[in-house]
Amino acid sequence: LAAACCSLLLVIGVTAARVIQVSYIGCFKDNSARDMRGLSGISRVGEISVSDPRVISGSMTQDFCSSFCALGGFPYFGLQYAKACFCSWDFGSLGPAKEIDCNMPCNGNSSQICGGPWKNSVFALEYPKRSCFKQSQMPSLNVSSALPTSWSIAAQTALDCLIPCEASADCQAVIFSGKQRLCHLLRFAYPPASLSSTDGDYFLRG
């Protein structure tokens, strides 16, 4: 439990430097096939487990879910049944629900609404133009996934690494190895388990 709480704080800390505008869209239906599937294939982000494809927490809040989904640059997030967080590139495949059906207070903040049974409270995430990067220490947490969460390209300089990341909506951070002349572009702000601080300099997209 202590490790999970630390991970929640680190998630919020990593995204705190980004100015994220959150806006409520509405209440939408869900079923066992899942309407919001952005986390498909991801099994773990740091100490936070992901399954089916969502994060479940007994202390869930809108703030945590928005910060968590911002790690992957997702434009939408949804909260369900007081405790579940979904990230997604789209939503609404099952249609809207009545607003009264999204009526469950979030487990971690009773003043916020976190969906209902098989109903998602859906929000939009808007990011500033992210054309700047901040060099910082590599996050101690990483991403475990059945699908690739990074890709590599040849790079002679750090600038050769940052320019393609800026041009890609999927890129949230980079690791540049001057020794290997290699750039690792990350789909999440956290690196995959196969990369470490010894693999180069870490730059977070702001």
Image (tube, rainbow, N blue to C red):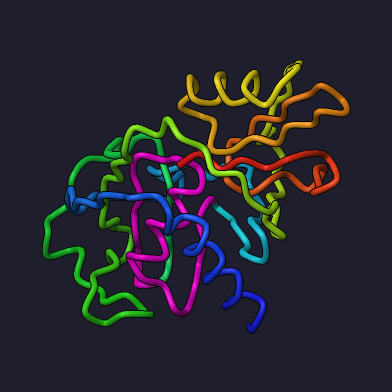
Q: Residue 115: image x %, image y %?
A: 27, 64
Observer-nearest residue: 76 or 184?
184
Observer-nearest residue: 146 or 201?
201
Q: Is residue 67 above or below residue 111?
A: above
Observer-nearest residue: 91 or 126?
126
Residue 79 covered by magenta stretch: yes
Say which quarter of the image contains residue 202. Answer: top right
Q: Residue 185: image x %, image y %?
A: 65, 30
Residue 167 is left or right of residue 159, and the answer is left
Q: Is residue 183 above or below residue 128?
A: above
Residue 66 is left or right of residue 136, and the answer is left
Q: Which residues are magenta?
A: 53-82
Image quadrant occupied by the C terminus: top left
Q: Residue 148: image x %, image y %?
A: 69, 33
Observer-nearest residue: 160 or 35?
160
Q: Residue at x 46, y 27 (%)?
A: 169
Say which quarter of the image contains residue 127. Answer: top left
Q: Is residue 110 above or below residue 22?
A: below
Q: Residue at x 31, y 38 (%)?
A: 128
Q: Residue 29: image x %, image y %?
A: 27, 50
Q: Residue at x 29, y 56 (%)?
A: 120
Image quadrant occupied by the N terminus: bottom right
Residue 26 is left or right of residue 81, and the answer is left
